[in-house]
Amino acid sequence: MRAFTRLLLLILLFPGSTFASHIVGLDLFYKHVSGNTYTITLIAYADCGPASASAFATLPTASPTVCIYDGGTSVGTVTLMVEAPATGVEITPVCPKDTANTQCTNPSNPIPGIKKFVYSANYTLPYTSAVWRFIFTGDLSGGSALAGRAAAITNLMGATTSQLVDTLNNTTSDNSSPVLTSVPVPFFCLNNNDTYNPGAVDPDGDNLVFDLVDGISGSANCSPPNLPVTYIAGRSGADPLIYNPGSFTFDRTTGQIDFYPNVIQRALVVYNIQEFRGGNFVGSCQREMTFLIIPCTVTPPTGTLNGATAGFITDDTHFKICKDSGDFSLYVNPTSPDTNNNVTVTATGLPAGSAFHVINNGTKHPRCVLSWTSNGIPPGVYVYYLTYKDDACPLSGSQTQAFTISIMPVPDVKATGDVTSCLSGMGIMKAEGAVRYIWEPATGLGCPTCANTTAVMPKTTLYTVIGIDEFGCVGTDTASLIVYPDPPGALLYGITASQSIPYGSSIQLDVKGAWIYNWTPSGTLTNNNINNPIASPREKTTYTVYGYSKTGCPDSANVTIDVITTSEDVPTAFTPNGDGINDVFCVTNLAWGRLVELSVYNRWGQRVFTTTDNTKGWDGTFNGIQQDMGVYHYYITVEREDKTPVHHKGDVTLIR
């Protein structure tokens, strides 16, 4: 909100403002003192400008009346007195050099001004009730001065008198109204994404629910009826503004209004803030204000969530994290559309135990950090507010933004087990309370990631289920599959003895004593569901057989089959004389291996033969010419059955 730079333009746009134009906002709230005594307070925010001079002059001596009702029954009245300073407190956000140049100092000054007047008094309720009502009907001074609404308000039909109503239920506990930390004098830019928040902080830590409600036409006395004001066509208390279609949102949890106004307007907006404690209604308070939408050249600073060290950001202002998931920090980097302005950030409503600091506050690029923990914090929605204020001269722009931290509850995961015995061998494990599940250990489970799963175990087993909800929050529970003891004695017998076989060979395994069999691993077995499958392993393998009796009692046994790889042979001499005996120099015993290279060299280092074919060898010739008797050198590389490379080099004698 480029707050007061717009006010002067507003006065020019609405020159017919009458007796009520001096009040631009009202707050009515109460604070518990002791017993049934409460301090009732009315705050009036008034325009210091010359158009309001006569009405403004009555405020320092005003004595507003508040009517006390028990439901529909009038109980009494209380007259409020002005608090010091009686002349009001100026809240115009001006630069230091212009503090004496607003219309609150001199009505002829060019800079508009706003003052806050506070009126209060103690009142002792005669008894407790669930339906106390404190009503300000617009009477500022015994009927001689009224808090009238300006005829220039554009969303109402005609001028009316202001009325605010607070409620209290003090039957079970005392209560104080929330403190509204942002002033109700909002000014907004036409054709801009605008936002407003009252910055409500409750001293009792109550849960707040915000509503936009119809304004009430006050009677200026304690006699009903007090009827709703009449809105222009298309507008209402819940939808008071004119804006681009689809741009208006209202958050009942934080009171945040976001909208894109497309028409110059001066609209009445009334907040009703309800308080709930432990789910029970304890009271409410109201704020009335005028939203002023006018053209402007500079928009106020803004800031949104742009980082978190844990949890997850759901949008510009909302953050969620699971309970007891640790510490976290949230980051906001406010900026001003006018890059010549510095931005100062203040925070209100910070969660108890959190830490907030601003790096480079009062510069063009402040960085806000809120640090807190989710450990030991009750689940719920925690709201805090950041106010961004620039240092434009002569008047500053400011904006208050609500942020929510939702501490998500851990899912209430419940697990139940089953009771079984070796007669059935099976039970059902069940879980509820989450959307995804992980059972640990997974041993014996048909579906370790299902809510309900079958479990087959030979003995009692404790399982833990991890439940994960839609927000990623985790809860756990445990349950047991209880298995009655097995009957005495082993079930399986006669298992094949562990032994070794040559590579490429097979062996028949065997076991006796069960009704149903299951061998594992099954990849090298002819059939893993019989008692005597044939195994053809290519490496050392331990086979486990699970057996079940006719009544379902389990047993298991193991057998290990080692695999022997062959060793290649290289002759030291050969006789290529054509007699069919030892005529060729080659590598033998390579039934399951592979020849990578066989090369033969003469004494001068010349290669006279090479091959990679297991079935071929050197016949003692080179280029078709028989070679002389003598010693030749060879180099051989083979790959054995288990893929191990082996190298041979040496001498071979050619004999003729």
Image (cartoon, grey):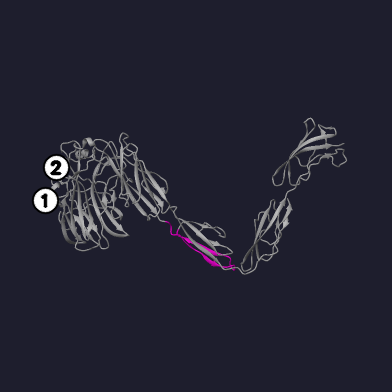
* Contact between labelled residues 2 and 1, with CB atoms less than 8 Å apart: no
Callout 1 amino acid = Ser
Q: Is residue 531 above or below residue 289?
A: below
**Callout 2: SS:** helix
**Which of the two residues, 49 or 243, is positioned nearer the viewer here?**
49
Q: Position of residue 124 (x, y in %)?
A: 19, 60
- Look at the image and tell me in which quarter the C terminus lies: top right
Callout 2 amino acid = Ala
**Is residue 425 located in the magenta-colored stretch of the structure?**
yes
Answer with the quarter of the image where residue 639 lies.
top right
**Callout 1: SS:** loop
Stretch of the chain drawn in magenta: 410-433
Answer whether residue 261 is visible to the viewer in this image. no
Q: Which residue is mark 1?
A: 144
Answer with the quarter of the image where residue 8 lies.
top left
- Furthest residue toward top: 604
Q: Which residue is mark 2?
A: 53
**Which of the two residues, 625 or 252, is positioned nearer the viewer here?**
625
- Look at the image and tell me in which quarter the N terminus lies: top left
**Which of the two residues, 591 or 298, is positioned nearer the viewer here?**
591
Relative to 405, 157 lies left or right: left
Answer with the quarter of the image where residue 40 lies.
bottom left
Q: Residues within 10 Å of mark 1 (few under 14, many from 20)?
A: few
Point out which mark residue 135 bears: none
C-alpha distance separating marks 1 and 2: 16 Å
Q: Earlier in the sequence, mark 1 or mark 2?
A: 2
Q: Position of residue 585 (x, y in %)?
A: 81, 39
Q: Residues within 10 Å of mark 2 (few under 14, many from 20)?
A: some
Answer whether residue 99 is visible to the viewer in this image. yes
